[in-house]
Structure formats: structure tokens, C-alpha cells
Image (cartoon, grey):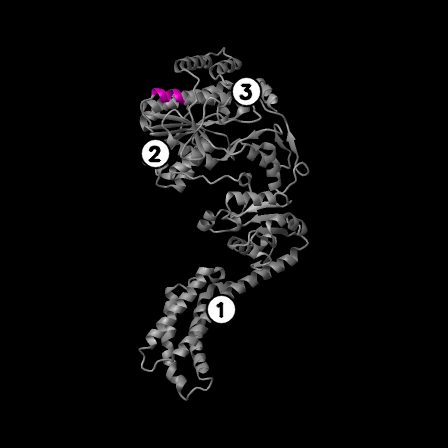
Amino acid sequence: MSNLKNYKNLIILGFDLSFIMFSYIFSCFLRFEFQLPDGYLGSVFPKILIPTGIYFFTFLIFGLYKTIWTVAGVYDYSNIVIANLISTSSTLIINTFLSNRIPYSIVIIASTLILLGTLSIRMLFRIYRSMFLNGNMLTKNSQRKHLEKFKNILIIGAGDSAAMLIKEIRNHPQLNLNIIGLIDDADHKQKSKVSGYKVLGKTDDMAEISEKYKVEEIIIAIPSADHIAKKEILEKAKKTKAKLRTVPGMYEILSEGLSIKSIRDVDVLDLLGRKEIILNNEEINAYIQNKTVMVTGGGGSIGSELCRQIAKLSPQKLIILDIYENNAYEIQNELLRKNPSIDLEVLIASVRDKKKITQIFKEYKPEVVFHAAAHKHVPLMEKSPEEAIKNNVFGTYNVAEAAKKYKAEKFILISTDKAVNPTNIMGASKRLCEMVIQMMDIESEYTDFVAVRFGNVLGSNGSVIPLFKKQIEEGGPVTLTHKDITRFFMTIPEAVQLVMQAGSYAKGGEIFVLDMGEPVKIYDLAENLIKLSGFEPNKEIEIKVIGLRPGEKLYEELLMEEEGLKDTPNSRIFVGRPNGFKIDQLKIHLETLNKMLEDETSMPEDIVIKMKEVVTTYKTELQEKAIQESNL
């Protein structure tokens, strides 16, 4: 096989030249019904060298001796056909100027034979390779048939992606994947075959087919399916006991191709059925492009994704500010690798350090500020309320004050649904952050201060999905705090795209609210994740309810009652203008809080009491529990 690889192009070249000459000689015999006139072959043979040369140079120009024919595709075989047609046309044209030209019938017959021959020899290499691999596979399988078990897989979709997937599986026999067939909802594809495998039915038959053939894994090979169609398929697939996997999206396949490595596990994100986000890139470019942009908390889940998307929009300079050096270092390396021409500055500093923040703004004068730095873990902040106030409230105050002083154009606070009628100190601190930036907006003549509020982001640090996955990998149990608890969810890229779009609408003082879709029951989320992993909930993996944590709500809200809600040009973004506080009073409260933080005798519970006075919608855990139980 290795010798064949080394000399295959020479073999093909030798075959082409020999076969071209043979085709013309054989065509002469056919033309005269195998009764050639005396001396005819001798007179015509020198002329055969002309088309032979034409074919040879045309094939060279089309790169037919550089192609790897063992993995050739439609494009490569189309090249052969085009090269043959050009060679035939050139031969016919030149032949008309010869004194004793070759009969046109011979040229046409020979050209047909040459086309078939050049296609056949190249296809033989693919067949040989396939036989070689299959031979190896059969040998290996016979040696290990008692040691290893093949995994039965079912493919959803019977189009081009399914054919590519089958080819990949055939090329990797070591994976021990046994394709039992395909499923497709198209009527005309029923009982037809794709690469030798039969379409066994439709998606409604998935559970029955999976049980009949003991399917262990289902691979969804429909990259062009929209979010609604994909969600429907996944809901049906969840009824089987098989593990679910999917090929990447159409854009990724077109840019990177389809390989075994690109096939990923189906995630809970796929079950959300989110609508595609439509952005106005011109509006976003207008306030990002050629501007100095700062992202605080730039190494975190939201901050790092903000940096990724901003980097694509050609800012004049991107400043990443974070207190945690490891995260900052990772996003720095990633951005420089993917955007080598970007002017990137990474600064290690705390938003609590007013002097340092002021120095940074004085030196770099950022024009757009995304403030994502914050403490966000609810139970941890319940234990350390003073840290939530120091970092979230006064950290925001420091950055906002510097932005106002050095005339940033926009200041965009990343807020949370937990700021609405908060029952924990983290939510109350974020509500106070919103009040701070609204106060700053009123006092600022130049900077537009706004907040963008959204719920939980899937896959972020400390979120429920990574926790559930780890618990499933460890064999369970999967733990959640209450069977009826619900949360709004959004993907990180989704949230960041909408944050950036909301920034383009900012006129100052707004609190933008992102459409998070319908709230999701965490219990259902746990069940789905267990099923997607190929297990049965509460049989193979236990779901254990452990009780609400301190400060935790059964449900989250996105908008306070008094805010009202107005549309924006983007159907996924709404805007409200909360009120209910006086600036002079707020400043006094902030001064008092600051003194309490500096006073060593102040107790955490004193800070909580003060926060309830400042954020009037802040209810204690017991108050909220009583309200929620009355609503059940």
C-alpha cells in the first residue's frame, strides 16, 4: 500500500498516456468494423500523438496528477470531465487543419473511451483503499470480536451531511460504530438508501426503531434545521434510551468540513429552541469601531465573550481589566492568536481601588465601557454581604465616576434579573448599582449611562449546567434546591450580542431588559440533561432535592412593576426607566454605607438592614418565602 501511495501519480500518468493511444487505435478498428485498410494504422498513428499531447497538457493544467484520488470528491471528478471536454474540443479544432485529418467519428469514439477510462482508473484507487481498510477492519474485528462490542447508531437525516457522516464513520473503523440505518421525515426518501444504508422510517418511529435495533447512540445530521425543527427532533429523541449527538451547524461545516471530532453531544441549549438573534451590525459598529473600549471583569464568562465579539469589530484599542490574572492571561492569549493585529491592553486591577481606576481612565481615556466586574454567587454573598457592597456597589461607583470624569461616551452596566425585588444581598447590590448609574447619568453631561438586565447564562462559571454535568459524570445524584424552582436562561454569546445591541440604543438612564424566553424548570433541565447523557432519571441517575439556599428565590423576575416596558427596534430587547429614588437621598445612603464598611464595629447584619432601607424592594428570605407560598 505504501509503494502504491508513492507511485500512484506516475501509475495514473502512464495509464492515461497508454489508454489515450489505445483508445484511438481501438476506435480505428471500430470505425472500420475491425477490417482496417492496408497501411491505414501506420499512416494515422503519428497523428494520434497530437491528441495524446493535448490531453497530457490539459490534464497537467487541471492538476489531475496532484489530486489525492483516494479522498476525491465531486469537484475532483468534475475536473476530469471538464478536462476531457476541453481536450476533445481542442483535438477537433486542430484536426480540421490537418491535411489528412483523423475521421471525426474516430475522435468522438476515442474521446468517449478516454473519459470512461480516466474516470475508472481514479475510482479504482478509491475502491482499492476501501477494500484495504475493510480488509484491515475485518481482520481486526475477527481478532477482537470477543473483546470489543460494536455500538449501534442511528442517523437522523438522509441528506448530504448524513452521507458525509457515513463516510467519516467508514474511514474510522477503530471507533466500532455500527450504523443500523437512517431516519428522515421526507416521504420520497422512505425505504431509499444513502451510501448503502436504508432509511428505516420517520422521526415519529424513532423510539420504536431504537428499541428494535438496540440503538445506543443517535446522531442528528441535519445542520440546516431551524431551531423549532431541531427542538421537535430532540424532544422525540429524548423518548429513547440512546445518547444523543449532533453534527455542527451548516456554517461550521462549510468553513471547516465535517469530521468525527466535530460531532458533539447534544446539549440542553439545543432543547431551548431559541430564535435566531438578528442584530443591526451597522449600529453596533458605529459605537465600537475605531474606539477605545474597556471591559471590566474581562476575564469572566460574560466579560471574555464581550472581548471576543468586540475584537471582531476593529476597535482602536481593547482594554481588559480584571483582578484575576489567570483568566485575563487566557483571554489575552486567545485574542492575540485569533486577532494578531488587535491593539490589546490587559490590566490587573480591582474596581474597588478608586485611585488605580482613576489613573487607568486618565491614561487610556476609554470611550466605551462595559462594566461586567462583579461578585455574583448568591449563597457566598449571603455569608459576606460587606464584600458584595464593596465590589459590586462601590466598584461600580468608582468605574462610573471615572467614566464621567474622563468623558466616556457610553457606560454599560451588566445587571441581573436578581436585581428585581431582590431577596438576597447580591441582587440588592446589583439593584443599587443600577441606581448608581442612573444617578450618574443625570449628573453627566457627556456620558450615557445604562444597564442591561438578563437572567442566568448557560455554561457560565458557577452556573447549574456544568455542575449537573459533573454530577452525572460521577454517577449522581444530581442535586437541586427545589422541585418547582424556575429560571430564565440564555446562552453566553446570545446575551453578549444583545448587550452590545442594547448599547447602540443607549440615550442615557435606561435599563434594558433582554427577552429570556419562557422560564425553565430546573427539575426539567436536570431530567433532560440526564436523558441526553443516555441515562434514565431517578433510575440510573438520582435527582435529589436538597432545599432552597439562603437568599434563593423559587422564580426570578426581569422587571419591577413600576418600570413599564417599551419596545426597541430589536424584538429581543425592551427598555424601562425605573424610578422611586431621590439622588440626594441616595448619595447620603452611599456615604453611610461606605462609613459602615470602614467601621470595624459594623456587623454584616447591620449592612443588610441598611441595604433594605436603601433598596426598598429588597425583602428578606423569610418575607419572600411567605409571599411565594401564598402564591402557590
Q: Neighbour class for label 2 at 10 Å: few (<14), some, many (≥20)?
A: many
Which residue does the image show at 39% across and 36% down from the upper left?
310
Instruction: Judge by depth and name the residue closer to the eye, 275 or 71.
Output: 275
Q: Are marks 1 and 3 in contact (CB under 8 Å)?
A: no
Question: Residue 626: which quarter of the image?
Answer: top right
Gap in Å between the C-alphas at discs 1 and 3?
A: 75 Å
Q: Is residue 203 above or below residue 94?
A: above
| Residue 583 painted magenta | no
Q: Which residue is mark 2?
A: 287
Q: Neighbour class for label 3 at 10 Å: few (<14), some, many (≥20)?
A: few
User: SS at mark 1?
Assistant: helix
Name the front one of labels 2 and 3: 2
Work out whether mark 1 precedes mark 3 in sequence or the reverse, and give the earlier one.
Answer: 1
Give x and y (percent) for residue 51: 37, 74
User: SS at mark 3?
Assistant: helix
Q: Which residue is mark 1?
A: 120
Which residue does the image show at 44% across and 60% down from the upper left?
75
In what quadrant of the picture does the C terminus appear? Answer: top right
Work out whether mark 2 precedes mark 3 in sequence or the reverse, and give the earlier one.
Answer: 2
Q: Which mark is residue 565?
A: none
Indicate the amino acid at tag 2. Tyr
Q: Which residue is mark 3?
A: 383
User: SS at mark 2?
Assistant: helix
